[in-house]
Image: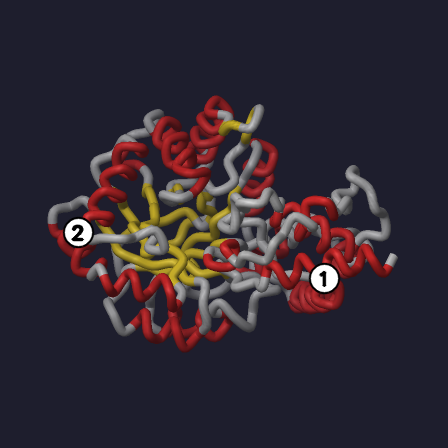
Amino acid sequence: MKMSKLDKLNLSLSKLGFGAMRLPQKNGEIDQEQVNNMVKYAFNNGINYFDTAFVYNDGGSEIALGVALKQLKREDFFLADKLPFWQADSKEYLDNTFNTTLNRLQTDYIDFYLMHALDREVFENMMKYDAISWAIQKKKVGKIKYLGFSIHDDYDFLLEVLKQYDWDIAQIQFNYLDLEDNPGEKGYLELSKRNIPIVIMEPLKGGLLSDIPDNIAAPFREIGGSNVSYAFRWLAEKEGIVTILSGMSNMQQLEENIKVFEDIKPLSEDEHKAILKVEENIKTLQKVKCTGCRYCMPCPFGVEIPDIFKAWNTKAMHNSSNWISGTFIDYKSAGKCVECGKCMTHCPQHIQIPEMLQKVLSEKIKK
């Protein structure tokens, strides 16, 4: 496994991180046995960075990961978790949430504790409850080792966040499609310049960069190599990026990703050109910038938002229209939207969800 040396923190982190937002499921519940096997396999193959959050799977992710990690010695791995501020309503919320996290994970401390999914609205709550001072106190007593943040907003807002503290680590959404915003390439360069170690989320943009039809990924097919490997290698060669998270849902994905990182090499000039061509192909067809994170769910009216958007994007890249190809759009579900806007308050991509659902429905009408 390729490792990253963090001179600033005197640590070594695995270049591939185990993301626990999309854990395997069985009969609608997290498959604990499979999670246990995946965590043990990941660790035995060099992964030492495990990432979860208080809100993932309504707490189920923390619980499942906590059980799985009991197979390992606590000092042998790094655990990252996140504090959501969109639910905060008092100062007591900080301690209550943090203690719940420790109990779910069955641990006495968190290695990397992040202020979760910061945007301007969430940031106001973070400042209102003086969360940084609170976290600093946790650091002093050893409950938090390193303090960071994850962000889903633009470059100017990133600069505002950076003014607040000398952060130990930052987590950003970045891939060869997300160059312009949230906080994009400009944000990546700013963090790198400040020598703040960078963790990457959504390297495959919710699976979009792995499930690319061959006609769109033709430049990759011409020179060989998988869609996934190009997305990972594009990130891995960039200075300042220490860990690339992957939300793996089964053992096969884990094994394939580990194989990429065992002997990961810089991209050649021809490979860089191929990525640019594939990027152009995708952007021409993509309908909506949804990553399938499911922060918008559940919808109070039963709209299956991520599934609809995934099918919409997939259908734009595929000629077929059936459930096997993943291009079946559930128009009935989309039609349940009453445009209440609740979903938008949680969307890290700032998608105008009701407006996009109306566009989905309008395409059906045209047909």
> Does 42 appear above or below 167?
above
Report which residue position mark 2 lands on: 139
Q: Residue at x 39, y 42 (%)?
A: 50
Residue 256: x and y, percent? Answer: 60, 39
Lateral position of residue 366 relative to residue 343, left or right: right
Q: Callout 2: few (<14), some (14-19), or many (20+) C-alpha neighbours within 10 Å?
A: some
> Does 239 appear above or below 300?
below
Residue 170: x and y, percent? Answer: 36, 60
Q: Are marks 1 and 2 in contact (CB under 8 Å)?
A: no
Q: Residue at x 44, y 46 (%)?
A: 17
**What label sits on residue 47 in the rendered view?**
none
Report which residue position mark 1 lands on: 359
Residue 89 visible to the viewer: yes
Q: Residue at x 77, y 52 (%)?
A: 315
Please name the amino acid that badge 2 sits on: Lys
Lateral position of residue 77 relative to residue 177, left or right: left
Q: Residue at x 56, y 25 (%)?
A: 26
Q: Quadrant of residue 328?
A: top right
Q: Nearer the viewer, mark 1 or mark 2?
A: 1
- Could you say which is closer to the camera, residue 117 or residue 179? 117
Q: Secondary structure at mark 1?
A: helix
Please name the amino acid that badge 1 sits on: Lys
